[in-house]
Image (cartoon, grey):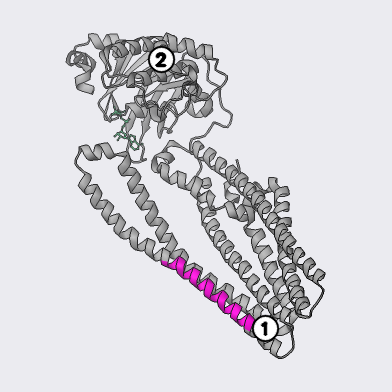
Amino acid sequence: MRDASSLTYGALLRTYLGPQWRRMCIVTSLLLIILAFQLINPYILRYFIDTALSGGQQTSLLLAGFLFVGLALLNQGATIYETYVSENVAWTATNRLRADLVAHCLRLDIAFHKSHTSGELIERIDGDVDALATFFSRSFVLIASNTLLIVGLIVVLFQQHWLVGLVMGIFALIATYILLRMRSFAIRAETLERQKDAEFYGFLGEQLAGTADMRANGATFYVLWCFYLLLRSWYPANRRAALMRFSVFVTTIAVFGVGNAVALALGAYLWTQHQITPGMVYFIFYCTNLLNQPIDQIRRELQNLQKAGAGIERIRSLFNIQPAITDADVPITLPDGPLAVSFQHVTFGYNADEAVLRDISFDLAPGHVLGLLGRTGSGKTTTARLLLRLYDVQQGEIRLSGVPLRATGLTDLRHHIGMVTQDVQLFHASVRNNLTFFNASVPDSLILSTLEDLGLGPWLRSLPAGLDTELGSDGEGLSAGEAQLLAFTRVFLANPGLVILDEASSRLDPATEQLIERAINKLLDGRSAIIIAHRLGTVQRADEILILEDGGVLEYGKRATLASDSTSRFYTLLQTGLEEVLA
Ligand SMILES: Nc1ncnc2c1ncn2[C@@H]1O[C@H](COP(=O)(O)OP(=O)(O)OP(=O)(O)O)[C@@H](O)[C@H]1O
C-alpha cells in the first residue's frame, strides 16, 4: 500500500507508471515518429505540386505520390499501435490504483462505511480513477509532443518565408488562448450537469430499490412529484452544458477557419509578389491546417489534466482517511478452543456524547452460553459489534481469554469469533465460495459432511451443479431458513472458539426450525456462545442470562438461579412469554 500523503502528480506517475517505463518509452517513441511523419508530408506535397507545375518527370511525381501514401499508411499503423500500448498503460495503471483504493476502503472502519453510501464509494473508486486514465497514458507526452509539433510547424513556415512564420506563430498563440477560455466556460456548465446527473440517478436508484414499499404505502404520487422537480432542474443544466459544448465546437471551427483564410490570403499575396511558388502556397495552407490538430489536442489534454487534478484531490483525501481500529503493535495470539469473554465496565456510543451501552460488565467462562435479552434498541447487536472490534469501546475493557481486544490482531480476532446474524449476506458466487469465503484450502469433503450434518444434504442434492452451483446475489432463490443454515455451515467450517448468534425473530416453518435447533446444538458443542435470543427454546440452552435495558444491565446471573427467583425479571419474562415481550 502506498503512502497517501505523497499523492502528488509526481508520486502518482512514479508509483503507477514507474513499473511500465518500457511501454512509456514505446509510446513516446511512437508519438515522435508520428510527429516526424506529419512534418515530412507537406514537403512531399510541395515537391509534387512544384514538379507538376514546372513539367517535371512523371517518375518523380509517381515516387512522391507513393512516398506520400506509404508514409500515410505508416502513420496510421504507428497511431494504432500507439493507441494500443497507451490503452494498456492506462488500464494497468488505473487498475492498480483501483485495487489500492479498494484495499484501503476495506481496511477502513465500519463507522466510515456507515457514513458513506456505496454509490459514493463506487464513484470515488471508479469515476475519479477513470479521469486519470488519459493522464497516466499520454497527457504529458501528448502535450509535449504536440507543443513540439506546433514549434516544428512554425519553424518550417519560417523557413518558407519569415512573414508566414511570424503570422502563423501569432495565430497559434491566439487560437490556443481563445479555445482555452471557451473551455473554462464549458467546464462550469458541465460540472453542474454532472451534479444534476448524480442527483437524478441517486434518486432513481433509491426509488427503484424501495419500489415495493413505496407502492405498498401509496407514495407513488409523492415520488413522481419529486421526479418532476428533479427533471425540471436537470433539463436546463443539460441544455446549458450542450449549448456550451456546441459553442466550443463552433468556435473551434471558426478559429481554424480564420487561420486557414489568413494562410491562403498570405500565400496568395506572396505568390502575386513572386516571392513563393504555388507549391509553397499549398505548403503554407497545409501546414496551417496541420497546426489546428495539435492546438486542439493540447486544449483537450489540458482539460484532462484539470479533470485529473480534481480526481487526484478526491483520491488523496480518501487515502488520507486512516482506520482508527488497527492491529496491536505486537499482537497477542488468541488461544484455540472455547474462549472466555469478559466485559469490564464497558461504555460505548456511536456518537461520543450519546452512550448506547453504559457500564456493562459480565464474565462468561469458556464453553458457556450467554443468553442476551432486551427490547429492540437496547444494545444487543452493539455488544456483538464491540466483540468483533468493529468499534472500540470508549470506557472499560473487553477481554477474550484474558487478552484485551486491543492487544490482538484483527484478523486473528475475527478468525476466533463466528457470527450468524438475521441478515445472511450471500454473494453471487458458487455455493462452495459462499461457504468458505473463497478459501480454497477448505476440502470439499469437509463442506459436504458439514452440510449433511446440518440437514442441508437434500437441498445440496437438488442443486444442478452441487457445490459449483452459482447462488443469486443476496441469496436469491433461498428460503430464510436455508440461508440461516448456510450461515451456520460457514461458522462450522471456520471453527471459531466463540460464536455470536443473532437468532431470527420471525417464525420459520416447524421442519426448518427443527433443523436450525439441531444446528445450534451442534454449533454450541465445545464453543463459547453469546446468543441474542428471541425464543424460549434458545434461552433454555443458556448457562447465564444478561438482560439489557436502555444500554444498561437490567439483570445478570445464572439462568437456573434467575428462573427460580420469582422476583427476577427473567422469571417474569418466562411467565409472560419471551416472544411477546421482546419481539
Ligand atoms: N451505526 C449506528 N450508528 C448510530 N446509532 C446506532 C447504530 N447502530 C445502532 N445504533 C443505535 O444504538 C442503539 C442500540 O442499537 P442495537 O442495534 O445495538 O440494538 P438491539 O438491541 O440490537 O436492537 P434489535 O433487537 O432491534 O436489533 C439504538 O438506539 C440504535 O438506534
**Residue 257 versus residue 536: which sits nearer the camera?**
257
Instruction: Decide: few, some or many residues near mark 1? Use Cα within 10 Å; few <14, some 14-19, many ≥20.
Output: many
Instruction: Decide: few, some or many residues near mark 2? Use Cα within 10 Å; few <14, some 14-19, many ≥20.
Output: few
Q: Could you say which quadrant of the image residue 289 lies in?
A: bottom right
Drawn side of residue 52 relative to residue 410, left or right: right
**Residue 94 versus residue 317: which sits nearer the camera?**
94
Q: Residue at x 40, y 35 (%)?
A: 394
Label 2 sits on residue? 462
Q: Which mark is residue 267?
A: 1
Q: Is residue 95 visible?
A: yes
Residue 373 vertical position relative to residue 107 in the rendered view, above or below: above
Q: Amino acid at mark 2?
A: Ser
Q: Residue at x 64, y 63 (%)?
A: 143
Q: Position of residue 125 (x, y in %)?
A: 50, 45
Q: Residue at x 40, y 60 (%)?
A: 192
Ligand 1 near label 2 (Cβ, under 8 Å)?
no
The magenta-colored residue range is: 243-264
Drawn side of residue 503 relative to residue 342, left or right: left
